[in-house]
Amino acid sequence: MRSISATQLINALPFLRSAPYTVHSLPAGTPVFTEGVDCGKIGFVQRGIVRVFKMSETGREITLYRIEAGESCILSMSCALSNPIHQASAVVEEDAELLTLTTHDFQHLVEKSHEARNYLFSQFATRLTDVMLLVEEIVFKRMDERLAALLADPKRDVDEYISIASEEKLQITHIAETHIHADFLTGSRELARQTGAELYLSNEGGPDWQYSAPHIGLRDGSSFMVGNVKIDVWHTPGHTPEHISFLITDTKNSTVPVMMATGDFVFVGDVGRPDLLERAAGYVGTMERGARQMYQSLQRFKTLPDFVQILPGHGAGSACGKSLGAVPFSTVGYEKITNWALNITNENDFVQEILRGQPEAPTYFAMMKKLNTSERTVLKTIPQPRKYTLAELKMAMRDGAVIVDTRGKMSFAGGHIPGSLNIQDNNSFSTWAGWMLSYTQPIVLIAPDSRVEHLVRSLIRIGLDTVIGYVSDIEQWAYQGNSTETLEQINVQDLHQTLLISNAELLDVRGISEVEQGCIGGAKHIHAGHLPKLAQTLDKQRTYIVYCAGGDCSSLASSYLLQQDFKHVVNVIGGFNAWKEARLPIAEALAAEELEEMA
């Protein structure tokens, strides 16, 4: 019979070293974890054999598991279980020694030690499932029934993850980030606070790219287990210097990796842009260096087997790339065929192509970088702004709050509270909010009751925690005699005639890549998101006719100009798309370099 000493057991399970354990010598036949005998404790067998059994509904004993020396932990089995079918106990079959500690001490140990959690899940999630289904109250509120889970790059409103984990009987034990994000505020700290999970963060990139929060540092070649799943860390710089990706192997079924969580390294049809640090966060000289790092990272990526699935951090619509696909995941083989970045074999050509035509970098990205590395407010719950009375709304406006009107552009044009911004409730809401809103100014929303929570979640995901209240509509505002403002509209046919006889200034607020495809002759280009820093270059006494691709962001831009006391602002219905459909003359765009200089 195999034997193991307490010292050997502690060496095998180092997380026990800090635990206040007791060693017991138990002769054969001794009942374990029944009333009066170590009830409410956790035991590790050091020597001997212990048999665990339960009573069936008919009263017959059914053997569940036989534990030999040093093999496994017996979870505490209370003798006060409410359901008779759950009655269970254990008996020493051959003289044994047990190392025991209270469930309270064991819970404290598991909460602070990822090694203890890894051990618990790896040993019991598959080998003692039947035993653990008997236990009514144990560590982590029935952690016995749950499988370990890793969550990568979580959003800040983490209640959804916790709900899904509960429904799927998962315990979030590991939280990882692929890089210091610029486009949203991660919820890693909120999730760690609520679950007790460890943070696994990159220690790559040098001293300027280190996290201040306590964490387990990861480097190229690091690995760790999440239950039976092995996570191997690859350093994949390019998008950012510290970026890492996670190569995932299901060790229960295979010895080769089956998928990779790529974060902002490889997307479906695209790769992470390397220019954000310079264009959004002001890290001068990082753009070309990042592009060359990205090229080298991709050469390593191409060595992976074609069957490996990739799980990217973003899909279509993200500003972290220029041509992201809409499907949520892909494979290495598919990307080798279809992804432009994997089909350029010359590094200089790659650098030139990846830096060309990238969308404007939102100004709030610099704030995200700062907040994701330094200490910040950790949300305990989702903010619940109050529904304001008109008196409270007026007081908030007097105190400097900005009114964000989330209604559709035509409703806004027909009448709105003077000074309000039209940031429409659509998929681009948080992006435009990041461009246009201050991180210190209180916010009041104009939105239906049913949409307020969604909008608040969208704002806190980029760190805008200053929503103080909301109003469901402006009918009462107008009904009680308060002044409203309209936004004049013009269709493209009338615009064409107006341009022939008017000296109005035509303002194109689209992105550079859109303008490069053609524009309306004579238009001045300022991206809508750059208006807060460039509006002062415009003459407030002139008439400005504003257009974008379809009329949405031009409504936002127009509302901003009105807020800044521009006297006469007109929005183009349907924008440049309507202009093209009407077969009106299209002018050749300025070179991208000139447009960037103007911005």
Image: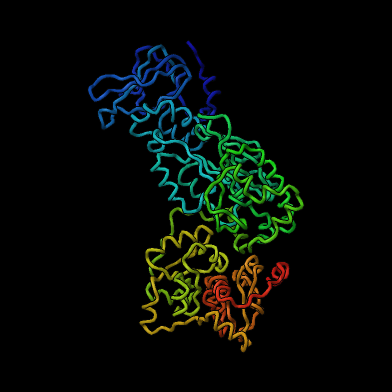
Specify the quadrant of the image occupied by residue 434: bottom right
- The answer to whether residue 344 is above or below residue 59 is below
Query: Residue at point 48% right, 60% down?
Result: 458
Q: Is residue 573 left or right of residue 389?
A: right
Q: Is residue 584 left or right of residue 350?
A: left
Return the residue nearer the eye: 145 or 18. 145
- The answer to whether residue 17 is above or below residue 368 is above
Return the residue nearer the eye: 334 or 229. 334
Q: Is residue 484 left or right of residue 476?
A: right
List x then y, in percent, for residue 177. 57, 46
List x then y, in percent, for residue 306. 61, 39
| Residue 370 visible in the current orientation | no
List x then y, in percent, for residue 130. 36, 27
List x then y, in percent, for residue 484. 44, 82
| Residue 552 visible in the current orientation | yes
Looking at the picture, the colour scheme in use is rainbow
Q: Residue pushed farthest front?
A: 583
- The answer to whether residue 213 is above or below residue 4 is below
Query: Residue at point 70% right, 67% down?
Result: 592
Q: Residue pushed farthest bottom?
A: 501
Query: Residue at point 37% right, 73% down?
Result: 389
Query: Residue at point 68% right, 45% down?
Result: 298
Specify the quadrant of the image occupied by residue 450: bottom left
Return the residue nearer the eye: 256 or 599. 256
Question: Which quadrant of the figure contains the C terminus?
Answer: bottom right
